[in-house]
């Protein structure tokens, strides 16, 4: 089969998209799960095009050859990331709510999604189950990133110590909480130039405890922001904030 140029209409948004390891680009052999999805589920054949993502920003049009090997590989541009990395620290939630938060945060452009138990978290961290749960949540993030046409693969981590995680967050930190000095996120955002990175912090269903609020108020480059007049579910709050961030700086 001769080499065929990518049809102009087939942008990455119009093609099936898959995150693959760097070895795939070197060997031009699709990983088994991707080959199954391509051949058995989507029923693609030689001559069809897909989009491969290396997870670090590299995007490639790939034309399938015989036996679903990659015959043609062409780098392309994909501008779907926010102009800076956003980390979300979410108070540990029940698995169903956590999965909703992950899907929405990935759609909204978050680069890192961290979960840790805060004082009022209803869900409890079970160390024995943490690795399998984190693996499942990472897979959900990958599937959602492929669907959302993300160029970079977001990272999901489940961690045991809320305050330790908080102290290591990229600055500035916007806590989505109604402290007495909280102002609207969009107003706060207009007061600072486009940052290199920032973090969003979301509490549990019952909110932060007084001790947690007092402690966070003492941390460097940390401020409370309000998302507006309406109260949101905890699993929806970060995505709502990401939408406002995109409107401000994207």
Image (cartoon, rainbow, N blue to C red):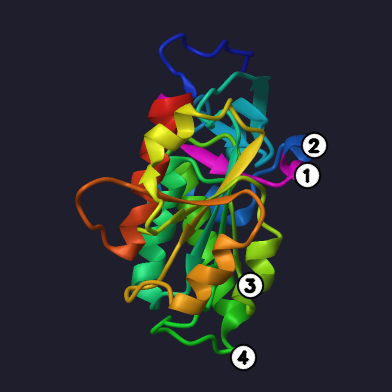
Q: Are marks 3 and 1 in contact (CB under 8 Å)?
A: no
Cα–Cα gap, marks 3 and 1: 38 Å
- Name the foreground residue: 132 vs 206: 206
Badge 4 or badge 3: first in the primary sequence? 4
Residue 40 seen in the current view: no
User: Residue 132, labelled with which disc?
Assistant: none
- Closer to the camera: disc 4 or disc 3? 3
Q: Residue 18: x and y, percent?
A: 54, 42
Q: CA distance from mark 2 to mark 3?
A: 42 Å
Residue beneath disc 3: 163
Q: Are marks 1 and 2 in contact (CB under 8 Å)?
A: yes
Q: Which residue is mark 1?
A: 23
Dot 2: what SS? Answer: helix
Residue 23 in magenta stretch: yes
Would you name the residue on which mark 2 appears? 26
Q: Is residue 220 left or right of residue 200?
A: right
Mark 1 and mark 4 lie on one chain; the one further toward the N terminus is 1
What residue is drawn where x is 62% and y is 26%?
A: 60
Q: Which residue is depicted at the point 47% across and 74% down?
A: 92
Above or below, comparing residue 191 to residue 37 in the picture: above
Quarter of the image with the N terminus is top right
Q: CA distance from mark 2 to mark 4?
A: 37 Å
Residue 12 x %, y %: 48, 25
Q: Which residues are magenta?
A: 13-24
Residue 152 is left or right of residue 11, and the answer is right
């Amino acid at each position: 089969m001769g080499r065929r140029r990518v049809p102009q209409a087939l942008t990455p948004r119009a093609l099936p998209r898959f995150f693959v390891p760097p070895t795939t680009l070197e060997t031009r052999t699709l990983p088994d799960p991707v080959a199954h999805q391509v051949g058995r589920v989507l029923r693609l054949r030689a001559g069809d095009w897909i989009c491969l993502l290396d997870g670090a920003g590299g995007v490639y049009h790939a034309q399938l050859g015989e036996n679903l090997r990659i015959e043609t590989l062409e780098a392309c541009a994909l501008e779907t990331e926010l102009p800076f990395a956003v980390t979300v620290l979410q108070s540990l939630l029940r698995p169903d709510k956590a999965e909703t938060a992950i899907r929405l945060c990935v759609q909204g452009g978050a680069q890192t999604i961290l979960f840790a138990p805060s004082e009022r978290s209803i869900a409890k961290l079970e160390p024995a189950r943490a690795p399998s749960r984190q693996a499942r949540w990472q897979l959900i993030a990958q599937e959602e990133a492929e669907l959302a046409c993300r160029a970079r693969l977001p990272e999901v981590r489940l961690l045991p110590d809320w305050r330790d995680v908080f102290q290591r967050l990229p600055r500035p930190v916007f806590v989505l909480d109604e402290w007495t000095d909280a102002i609207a996120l969009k107003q706060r955002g207009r007061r600072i130039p486009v940052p290199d990175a920032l973090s969003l912090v979301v509490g549990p269903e019952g909110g932060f405890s007084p001790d947690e609020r007092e402690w966070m108020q003492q941390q460097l480059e940390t401020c409370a922001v309000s998302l507006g007049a309406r109260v949101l579910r905890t699993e929806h709050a970060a995505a709502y904030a990401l939408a406002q961030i995109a409107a401000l700086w994207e």
